[in-house]
Image (cartoon, rainbow, N blue to C red):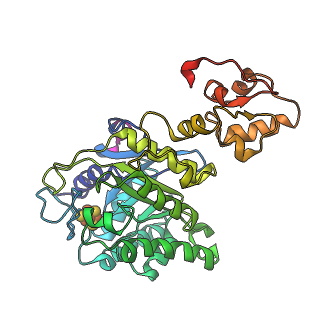
Amino acid sequence: MDAISRLKMLSAQTSFEPDGDSPLGPDRSRVPACIERRANDLYLSPAVMSGGGKILLLKSQLSSVCERDCHYCAFRAGRDFRRATFKPEEFAGVFMELYRRKAVDGLFVSSGIAGGGVRTQDKLLDTADILRRKLGYRGYLHLKIMPGAEKEQVYRAMQLADRVSVNLEAPNTARLAQLAPRKQFLEELIRPLRWVEEIRRSIPPIRAWKEHWPSSTTQFVAGGADESDVELLQTTQYLYGELRLKRTYFMAFSPVPDTPLENHEPTSGQRELRLYQASFLLRDYGFDLEEMPFEQDGNLPLAADPKLAWARANLAHSPIEINTADKRTLLRVPGIGLKGAEEILKIRRQHKLHDLGALRKIGIAADRAAPFVLLDGHQPAYQLGMM
Ligand code: SF4
């Protein structure tokens, strides 16, 4: 098979991997819609970066051959499908050709494991090294860290990439055993993420690519191990708080034919969305895990977003005065985001806010906020349906 045909196959098989800073949304059917086919019929995924810019990413494996047998995975050893493999220099050359032709803006590269995690990591590092040092590639590069990679390899990855990630897949050792019995949660997956943070904290970024250490992310297969949202968000809180991950991605479990979990119930896109919303409350809005509106079974309610559910329980009878509340308190109000809270503080320095129209003007979802706020001592009129 020629190189472009292999790349087409591998990019199609990898297109589900998340990247960038905007969630995919609740409807899984939107995923194919956000994937574009461009040059040579390759699958390319638009990704929104931290600064708000959108780039077209080629997401690919170096190889879809894998010696492991994770229960949910389409690439697991022994599963019958057409596989493809690239050598590092060959992959780097094909990608660079596409990049020079402006067919792609950035690269996400991972791999199935062949010959152990260390050997596979070396191949990914060689690919990145050829791109950066030999071919002069300066664009976005997201490098996957393989289970079992060594600290020196993690450090090298961080010197070459804009982002590194380790897929945890499950929130703890017991749940991972249900999904991927041959992966070791603490030793193979959490440890490399700890090293990333250790390196960021202890080594000056002058050693990093563009003198800036890469961000780190992870991904969970939500629902595949029958874990609860509490478990997923407990680990998420640790990852954001202690290891400063930029993002935890949640991929709703979807059964793959001819795998041990092929008859397992799929996870709804709505659950995935609620997990994203809750994770942002932990990361950006000052919420603690204990404040999440979990139900008896440890899951978030699907019917309302977690911030709204929290506000109904806590603010409905004690609304927040928009003209005096501090930023942390403003962020508790549904409809007020990070930008909106900043805008309120800015305007308040000049004059009071008297009505919902003033909130709308600065981009706040005023009808959503209305049941939970006071404006200059008065509760604004709102339609009941909004609450
Ligand atoms: S190691 Fe990765 S590619 Fe291999 S079976 Fe597990 S999840 Fe799939």
Which residue lies at the image location 58% right of the left edge and 54% below the top edge? 288
Instruction: Residue 32 in the image: state x and y as whole percent.
Output: 32, 39
- Residue 385 showing in the rendered view: yes
Quadrant of the drawing holding the N terminus: bottom left
Which residue lies at the image location 32% right of the left edge and 63% below the top edge? 175
**Viewer-proximal residue, 89 or 278?**
278
Q: Is residue 192 above or below residue 343?
A: below
Highlighted range, magenta: 33-39
Q: Is residue 376 above or below residue 12?
A: above
Residue at far right of view = 350
Which residue lies at the image location 36% right of the left edge and 53% below the top edge? 17
- Residue 96 showing in the rendered view: no
Q: Is residue 92 above or below residue 45?
A: below
Residue 230 in the magenta stretch? The answer is no
Q: Is residue 63 above or below residue 371?
A: below
Instruction: Residue 275 in the image: state x and y as whole percent.
Output: 45, 47
Q: Is residue 264 left or right of residue 251?
A: left
Tell me the quarter of the picture where residue 231 sits. bottom left
Image quadrant of ligand 1 equals bottom left
Callout count: 0
Instruction: Residue 179 in the image: state x and y as whole percent.
Output: 26, 62
Q: Is residue 338 left or right of residue 173?
A: right
